[in-house]
Image (cartoon, grey):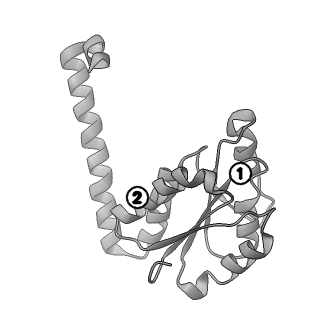
Amino acid sequence: MTKNPKVGIIMGSDTDLAIFAESGGILEEFGIPYEITVASAHRAPNLVHKYITTAKARGIKVIVAGAGGAAHLAGVCASLTTLPVIGVPTKAKTLDGLDSLLSTAQMPPGVPVATVGINAGKNAGILAVQILATSDKNLEEKLVVYKNKLEQDNKTKGEKLGKIGYKKYLDK
C-alpha cells in the first residue's frame, strides 16, 4: 500500500489494469499518492465493502472505480461512501463497452457516479486531480500548467499541419 494515499483505484478485474494504470500515471505526474486494487462487486462483494468503508480512515478523498460487463462496481462503491466516485466503464467482450457505460452512468437518484468515457483511465485520473485541486492551491497551479501544455501541444500540431499539409503530416 502507498503511504498516505489520497485516491483509491479499484477495478473489477486485473484484465483492466492497463486502463487504470493510466489513472495512476496521471496521479504520479501530479505527485498524488494513491493505492490500487482488484475487487469485483459480483465475485468479491465483501472485499469491495471493506475497501470502500475503510477508505476515509486511510485518507482517501476520491475513488476511481471501474468494471466491464454489468459494470456495477462504481455504483456499489458510491452506495457505500460519501466520497466522490469516478466511474470508468471498460470495454468488455460484448457491445464494445456500451453496456458498461450505461450501467456506470445510469445511477439512481442519491447515488451519483461521475462517469468518464469507455476505457478513459487517463481522464479519470485528471478528474480526480481536479477534485483534489478544489482544496489545494498548489495542485490547482499544477493543473493550470498541465492545461496550458495541452493547449500549446495542440497549437503546435495545428501549425505543423498548416505548414506541411495533411498528406505529409499523416506520413510523419
Q: x%, y% of residue 141?
A: 29, 66
- Residue found at the far top of this picture: 167
- Tell me whether circle 1 and circle 2 mark residues in contact (CB < 8 Å): no
Please tell me how crowded label 1 is: few (under 14), some (14-19), or many (20+) other residues with Cα within 10 Å: many
Please tell me how crowded label 2 is: few (under 14), some (14-19), or many (20+) other residues with Cα within 10 Å: many
Is 5 in front, or is 163? Answer: 5
Q: x%, y% of residue 155?
A: 25, 34
Q: Quadrant of the C terminus?
A: top left
Choose top left, top right, bottom left or bottom right for residue 114: bottom right
Q: Residue at x 69, y 61 (%)?
A: 74
Whether residue 58 can be seen here? yes
Residue type of the residue flagged with mark 1: Ala
Q: Residue at x 24, y 42 (%)?
A: 152
Q: Is 10 positioned to the left or the right of 139 in the image?
A: right
Kindly report the distance in space between the C-alpha atoms of the residues bearing marks 1 and 2.
Answer: 23 Å
Q: Is 52 positioned to the left or the right of 43 in the image?
A: left
Q: x%, y% of residue 34?
A: 47, 72
Q: Which residue is mark 2?
A: 26
Mark 1 vs mark 2: in front: 2
Residue type of the residue flagged with mark 2: Ile
Q: Residue at x 34, y 60 (%)?
A: 143
> Tag on residue 105?
1
Looking at the rendered structure, the secondary structure element under dot 1 is helix
